[in-house]
Image (cartoon, coloured by chain):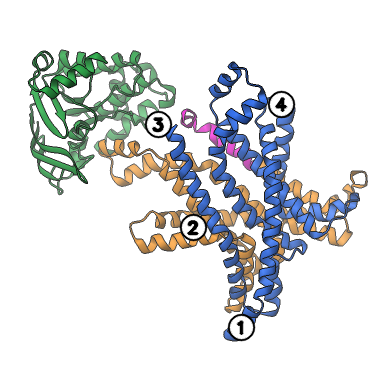
Chain colours: A green, B blue, C orange
Amino acid sequence: MISYKNVNKWYGELHVLNSINLEVEKGEVIVVCGPSGSGKSTLIRCINRLEPIQEGELVVDGMAVHDKKTNMTKIRAEIGFVFQSFNLYPHMTALENTTIAPLKVRGFNKAEAEKLGREMLTRVGLADRIDHYPAQLSGGQQQRVAIARGLTMKPKIMLFDEPTSALDPEMIHEVLDVMRDLAKEGMTMMAVTHEMGFAREVASRVVFMDEGKIIEIAPPNDFFTNPQTDRGKYFLQSILTH
Amino acid sequence: MWGFYFNELIRSLPFFLKGLYMTVAVAGLSLVFGTIIGFFGGIMRASRNKPARMIVGAWVDLIRGTPFLVQIFVIFFILPGIGIELEAFPAAVIALTNLTASFITEIVASGILAVPKGQREAATASGLSNYLQLRFIVLPQAIRSILPPLVGQYVLLVKDSSVVSAIGVVDITRVGWLTVQRIPEGLMVFGLVGLLYFAICYPLINLSGFLERRMTVASTKL
Amino acid sequence: MLEGFNFRIIWEYMPLYMQCFAATLWLSGLSLFGAVVVGIIACAMRLSQSRILRSIAGVYIETIRSTPLLAQLYFFYFGLPSMGIMLPEWLTGVIALTLNSGAYYAEIIRAGIQAIDFGQIEAGIASGLSYIQRMRFIILPQALGNTIRPMLGQAIILVKDSSLLSLISIMELTRAGQVLTSERFTPAEGFLTTAAFYLIIYYMLKAFSGWSEKRLIFREAH
């Protein structure tokens, strides 16, 4: 479904993605973790070309993202993306936030789009908040609207970039619950997160990154109980003790 | 003809420098007085005293809601009617001070109100008096958000001072107006007028922009 | 002063005031429309890829902001005839007001666009919206929300600035005050009535500004 072959990217001098090789199968849930600045966000932001890669091949659902000529609109319409800072449109209600892309990108009519939007907002537990503006919602609710916005694309892949790190602790679980349900329904997902409980429960594999490289790829139980590298051990210690 | 008029204009340069001096004098005096009055006005506008807030607010609205030209006419032509005779120069300084003070009042008030409420509460909790809170806790923090628009206001002050030419103060604009009667090359004469204002205002605009960037950096470091 | 205030004279001159009130409104309205158009164009140039367009817009905006409107007005009033261009006074006035406010509108619109969080653009990209769709549905509506207040503030300034047109003999509110003053030697009646009319416009625009702010409910959390 997603295939990285020798992917490289630099920010000036900084080698932010260093020879990345990774195959993600349909229905897999990949949790990406690592210290800050390790390149984990960049890894998933490349998939819908929020950031272009400079070398290597990146193929998503059979389409070559590394090729400048590829029309990204079609790929982006099949990928839902959830940001750390939500990035909801503040001048639109929850429903309008979820329907703008189906209306304008997929060409749905208003009734279809709203039906879909309501359905997705219900799915994330916000049926009673559809006419609220983002400013009237809590952080957890805003992030769930953002997930619903991604889902209305009827995506083949959902990407999450630290979806819970801007949230207060008591709101984290409501977002993780929604993500867990999605995973169990068989959605292909990649999530950058340090929520190890979530990783243990639903991840097919954990990808551990440091300094732009993938250091370890392992099933969650193996990675958490017996990391193969010193850097992995050190990282686990630092997040478990904190 | 251009060459001839150009030489004439060069010969009038001392006259323009006198105008420049007058502009700087009117604007400079109003700047000092306006800033002092504006700080007091701003502190009153942001205070907990409701009548003071309302009186200052009404005054600000009155000045903001009417053109400066009309304000000058009121001061220059009407005050003599109630027994206050004014020369053009003091009338201009009073009008411009009044205008500047009203704008600075708003700038200072919003700067003070932008300081988080918790700061005052903490100061109250440690027993500081109202005056001490203002002097040592609130104003030093507010000054970050006050300074850039304050300098911006000084630019407006210099530009607004051109309007005092209407009551006969011989500032840069008035010098231009008098000169153009003799040298009928409007582009040239008022090009020079513009250049003189530019020389004062442009550095001030850049200073304001610089302060804005400095202050933003400083406050994110906090 | 007030005991001698002569309301009968004001009433006598009311038709003149109404006529001049209308003149102030349409002169400002026309200039406002022109200024917003000029502002959008200058802003687009300033944000464009082309270095030449950026520089042209930059010189225009900086020159206008660094010189007084009155000097600009005289520049056109005395300058255009010396180039052989003869325009009616009102048109010269509207051109000066348009070009002056246009530079300020360019800066207001630019600030509004640049204040939008980059995450908004990324979210639009991630949903597959095209550049034009992102502009139309995400950037511009928010920029409008960010700018409505400074836009109306500039409109208030423009109305007040139009009083300077009286200095090139255009009949508008301030000129009406001058006429009454010079014909009847009653400056108080003349200029205070003028001021009252400006205050009506000011309070109307201010109320509209407050109302539009409330309608944009989403801004409250920012």
Query: Which chain is indicated by disc 4?
Result: B
| Residue C216 forms part of the magenta stretch | yes
Which mark is drawn over residue C38? Answer: 2
**Label 4: how many residues lie within 10 Å, few (<14), some (14-19) or many (20+)?**
few
Q: Secondary structure at mark 3?
A: loop
Range of residues picked out in magenta: C204-222
Q: Chain of mark 3?
A: A
Q: Amino acid at mark 3?
A: Met
Magenta highlight: main SS = helix
Whether the residues at callouts 4 and 1 have beta carbons within 8 Å, the answer is no
Task: Answer whether residue A139 is magenta in the image.
Answer: no
Mark 2: few, some, or many residues within 10 Å (few <14, many ≥20)? many
For marks 2 and 1, give the one nearer the viewer. 1
Identify the image quadrant of residue B201: bottom right
Output the chain of dot 2: C
Q: Which callout, 4 or 1, points to the residue nearer the camera? A: 1
Q: CA distance from mark 3 to mark 1?
A: 64 Å
Work out which quarter of the rendered image holds the C terminus of chain B and state it: top left
Q: Pointer 4: what residue?
A: B50
Q: Position of residue A140 (x, y in %)?
A: 34, 19
Which type of secondary structure does the marked residue at label 2 adopt?
A: helix
Q: Which residue is mark 1?
A: B7
Query: Percent position (x, y) of residue B152?
Result: 57, 49
